[in-house]
Image (tube, helix red, strand yellow):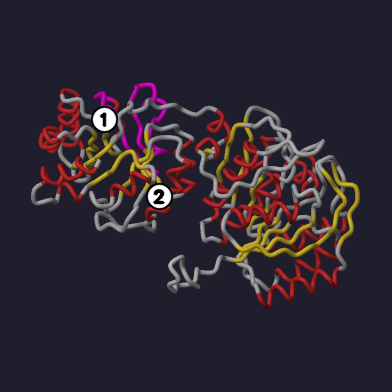
């Protein structure tokens, strides 16, 4: 391989391989065609195994021709020996013998399996007979790392008692008891202002909420979501992150789709999602997803240099240097001593127009009228967030990945911090460094100003600012500098 100057360059690393085993949709909106567009757009190499041919357009499905089981097995065998998958998306399989052929292969692979139990078309046409449905329950569910039924499919798998919003958690539990390793119940077919999906793996559970989009081009939503999850898992993201990214991809496709055909046209396929409005928000209950708090913003000025300090005395040192945003992060005091430090910092910040955020100690911050509080993910559950919002405090939230970003979005905070961007010695890392590219992708989806944190220096700031950073949270680079004022000056010059 050569570059534009004719010089040799290293070959690109091969993309992860994901398979889709599904039916062909000649209208291009669902099935293999939607899966291919989705997987390619998200950056994996997609391979296709054709389980059935269909006669369909945007108005519905008119006929189905399942692929002969031996031919289906041959497709799988030849692909497996040359292009083994990291992840597999299962869609419409066509019949019992096709389900059996695929299930036999799944017993031989450790690929991550997303099973979209396509049992009927939106128009009502049956896409899998009763024998095939029973085989799917008996053999596919126990091998599925994730199964993604919609409300209608829950009724066919479990019975009509599981089709209401209030019964979705019980339905997910029933599928887990039948062997599925994780379940995402899609609630888009339930009416209302919001679309709400429920996830559970038996240990972790949450709701993903998005505003309902009243559009006609909805053909292929289930196929697209399942193949997006498989693609993002193939890229190495944890399952909760894959669900958030896939939902944002789906929302993007709904928002930007074209009204093609006379019926339900297909989604747009535009690659990695990069618009904050497409991000779903993650909550513990559906009610929290429908009634989010709203925190005040930090004003028109960027957060800029944002030192994290452990004593109020640092504010007196930093204010003359032009620092206007500070976080008080005290880890070695408690009780009256901690309160005294917080009160001193709040009073000084108020007199000198410093945007002071108190780390963790939200009750003291609320009691003494702080400008804002900063909370980590583990601290959010214990804080009285409605009281903080009513009190007019600003809220900053730490995040490290896409599922935590979706959790932060549910709170509509004043800013969202991403990190660590680079490896740091300040604290033991529970999350790998994002790097500038990873930070940029998260920042593009953030619905609030973004703060970067993690081994930041003035030299690294321009790239992060170009990637979307409004604030630069700094600890050691300021407090450990031999001349902190000179170091602040370097930061101010860069920013």
Out of 270 and 399, give the one closest to the viewer: 270
Q: Nearer the viewer, residue 376 or 90?
A: 90
Q: Position of residue 70 (x, y in %)?
A: 85, 73
Question: Which quarter of the picture shows residue 351?
Answer: top left
Look at 26% across and 27% down and name the residue there. Answer: 370
Residue 378 in which image quadrant = top left
Task: Farthest residue to the front: give it.
Answer: 5
Rendering quarter of residue 133: bottom right
- Tell me: 350 left or right of 472: left
Q: Secondary structure at mark 2?
A: helix
Residue drawn at 44 percent across, 50 percent down: 401
In this view, the residue farthest toward the left is: 483
Q: Which residues are magenta?
A: 367-396
Residue assigned mark 1? 364
Task: Identify the mark at residue 439; answer none if there is no mark.
Answer: 2
Q: Position of residue 302 (x, y in %)?
A: 31, 33
Q: Classify residue 126 as left or right of residue 111.
A: right
Magenta run includes residue 450: no
Image quadrant holding the C terminus, namely top left
Q: Residues within 10 Å of mark 2 (few under 14, many from 20)?
A: many
The spot of residue 293 in percent (x, y) is 46, 27
Dot 1 or dot 2: first in sequence order is 1
- Name the residue: 13% across, 36% down: 321
Residue 55 seen? yes
Check contact, mark 1 vs mark 2: CB within 8 A: no
The foreground one among 225 and 178 is 225
- Please tell me whether mark 1 or mark 2 is closer to you in this view: 2
Q: Is residue 182 above or below residue 17?
A: above
Q: Residue at x 30, y 26 (%)?
A: 366
Q: Residues within 10 Å of mark 1 (few under 14, many from 20)?
A: some
């Amino acid at each position: 391989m050569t570059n534009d100057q004719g010089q040799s360059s290293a070959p690109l690393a091969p993309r992860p391989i994901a398979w889709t085993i599904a039916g062909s949709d000649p209208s291009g909106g669902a099935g293999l065609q939607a899966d291919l567009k989705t997987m390619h757009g998200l950056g994996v190499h997609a391979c296709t195994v054709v389980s059935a041919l269909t006669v369909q357009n945007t108005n519905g499905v008119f006929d189905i021709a399942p692929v002969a089981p031996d031919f289906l097995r041959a497709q799988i065998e030849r692909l497996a020996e040359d292009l083994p998958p990291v992840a597999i998306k299962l869609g419409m399989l066509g019949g019992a013998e096709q389900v059996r052929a695929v299930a036999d292969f799944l017993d031989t692979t450790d690929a991550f399996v997303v099973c979209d139990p396509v049992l009927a078309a939106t128009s009502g046409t049956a896409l899998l007979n009763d024998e095939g449905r029973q085989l799917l329950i008996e053999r596919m569910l126990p091998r599925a790392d994730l199964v993604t039924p919609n409300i209608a499919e829950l009724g066919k798998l479990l019975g009509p008692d599981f089709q209401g919003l209030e019964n979705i958690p019980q339905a997910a539990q029933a599928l887990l008891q039948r062997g599925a390793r994780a379940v995402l119940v899609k609630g888009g077919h339930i009416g209302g202002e919001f679309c709400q999906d429920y996830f559970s793996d038996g240990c972790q559970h949450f709701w993903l909420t998005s505003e309902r989009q009243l559009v006609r081009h909805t053909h292929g939503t289930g196929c697209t979501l399942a193949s997006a999850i498989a693609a993002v898992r193939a890229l190495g993201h944890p399952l909760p992150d894959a669900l958030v990214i896939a939902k944002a991809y789906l929302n993007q496709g709904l928002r930007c789709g074209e009204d093609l055909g006379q019926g339900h046209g297909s989604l747009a396929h535009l690659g990695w999602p990069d618009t904050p409005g497409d991000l779903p928000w993650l909550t513990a209950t559906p009610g929290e997803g429908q009634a989010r708090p709203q925190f005040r913003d930090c004003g028109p000025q960027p957060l800029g240099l944002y030192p994290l300090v452990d004593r109020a005395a640092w504010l007196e040192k930093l204010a003359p240097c032009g620092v206007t945003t500070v976080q008080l992060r005290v880890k070695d005091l408690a009780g009256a001593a901690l309160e005294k430090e917080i009160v001193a910092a709040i009073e000084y910040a108020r007199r000198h127009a410093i945007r002071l955020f108190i780390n963790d100690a939200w009750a003291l911050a609320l009691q003494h009228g702080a400008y804002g509080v900063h909370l980590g993910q583990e601290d959010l559950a214990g804080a009285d967030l409605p009281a903080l919002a009513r009190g007019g405090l600003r809220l900053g939230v730490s995040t490290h990945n896409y599922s935590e970003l979706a959790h932060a979005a549910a709170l509509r905070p004043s800013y969202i911090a991403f990190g660590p961007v680079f490896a740091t010695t300040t604290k033991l890392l529970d999350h790998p460094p994002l790097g500038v590219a990873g930070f940029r992708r998260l920042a593009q989806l953030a619905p609030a100003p973004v703060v970067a944190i993690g081994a930041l220096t003035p030299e690294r700031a321009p790239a992060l600012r170009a990637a979307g950073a409004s604030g630069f949270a700094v600890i050691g680079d300021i407090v450990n500098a031999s001349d902190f004022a000179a170091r602040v000056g370097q930061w101010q010059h860069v920013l």
